[in-house]
Amino acid sequence: MRKMAWILLALGLAGCAPRQIILTRSRLLMGNIPVNISLKVRPEQKAAALAAGDAAYRLAQSLEAKVSEYRSDSEVSCLNRNAGKAPCPLSPETLDLLQKAMEFCEKTDGALDIRFASLSPAGSRGQIRLSQDPGSGFLPNSQTRIGIGAIGKGWIVDRMIEELRSRGFSEALIDAGGDLRASGGPWMVSIQVPQAGPGVTAEERQIQNRSLATSGLYERGSHILDPKTRHAVERSSSVSVEAEDLTTADALDTALFVMGEEKARILIRRFPGLRVTWLDPDGQSRIYLSDDLSKERSAAPPDK
């Protein structure tokens, strides 16, 4: 259920105070995804900002080493390798991610399920047993396999923002392959029109202390699985979720894409503070607000 999102960050920051600059750095993380950190700083803060960015990247690498199912030495890979055999020790960070993933599975009625990679239908229904003291986990069914691709990127980026804030940089934006988390702001963003040429966007707007994530098929083809049917989901539209944190936006854009627009309109009522955009290849969009569905509206295609 690994996915990429297609939200484009518009260059520039609204309302910049005098003597401030935007310092941007980029590294490949989380499966060669370009992860860009932008910080709004005073010129004399440049050295400290570079150090803070380096610390955030190191944190991301250490978290990825614990939770990526694609690393044979990770804690999640230990769970998969020992399914049906024995428990594995888990760090507080891995426990936190897995607990959040299980909560989203329950709240989305299984539209997001980290057991999607299981070897059989029985395995995809297998338990995920977690223990806090001492930290450990166990997959009792030998056919169960878990993967955190549909939520892990957002969770790691949220931890990176916390690291930057702890070092005194509260005006930051992290763009991880199109999924982004804004601290402070406002920052200008837009959403790419599915199956359109590069730079054809819609829904340009400012966000502040919010996150934005998108699911669609127009760059990577059929790669999002429905955990219940174990088949790839085929849709020409995309769905973008704006939420307070990227963990939520990253998890729900996948779940809503799997469910489809009509079912998604009902599900989002369980999650306060969401702004959900369904975007068609012709640029037509529908916007749903979880807190007040009476404010739903449609938007015309962008000018080309």
Image (spheres, rainbow, N blue to C red):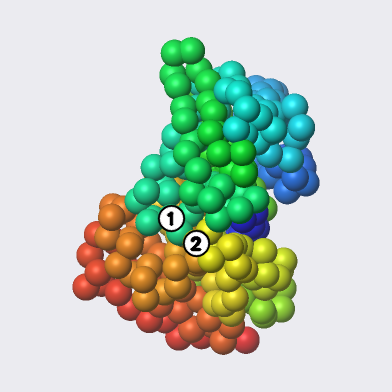
Disc 1 + disc 2, Cβ < 8 Å: yes
Name the spot of residue 39 as percent of width and height, x first: 60, 38
Q: Nearer the viewer, mark 1 or mark 2?
A: 2
Within 10 Å of the Cα at label 2, are there few (<14), some (14-19), or many (20+) other Cα atoms?
A: some
Residue 110's disc number: 1
Within 10 Å of the Cα at label 1, are there few (<14), some (14-19), or many (20+) other Cα atoms?
A: many
Q: Is residue 129 at least partly visible in the picture?
A: yes
Q: Residue 40: name its quadrant.
A: top right
Name the spot of residue 196 as percent of width and height, x first: 67, 80
Q: Is residue 117 at least partly visible in the picture?
A: no
Number of numbered discs overlaid on the protein picture: 2
Question: From the viewer's perspective, is residue 97 above or below residue 121?
Answer: above
| Amino acid tagged 2 | Lys
- Which secondary structure lies at badge 1? loop
Q: Quadrant of the N terminus?
A: bottom right
Q: Nearer the viewer, residue 282 or 143?
A: 143
| Amino acid tagged 1 | Gly
173 left or right of 185 in image = right
Q: Which residue is mark 2?
A: 228
* Residue at left offset 50%, top offset 43%: 126
Name the spot of residue 5 as percent of width and height, x first: 61, 60
* Residue at left offset 49%, top offset 49%: 125
* Residue at left offset 53%, top offset 26%: 137
Question: From the viewer's perspective, is residue 238 above or below residue 6?
Answer: below
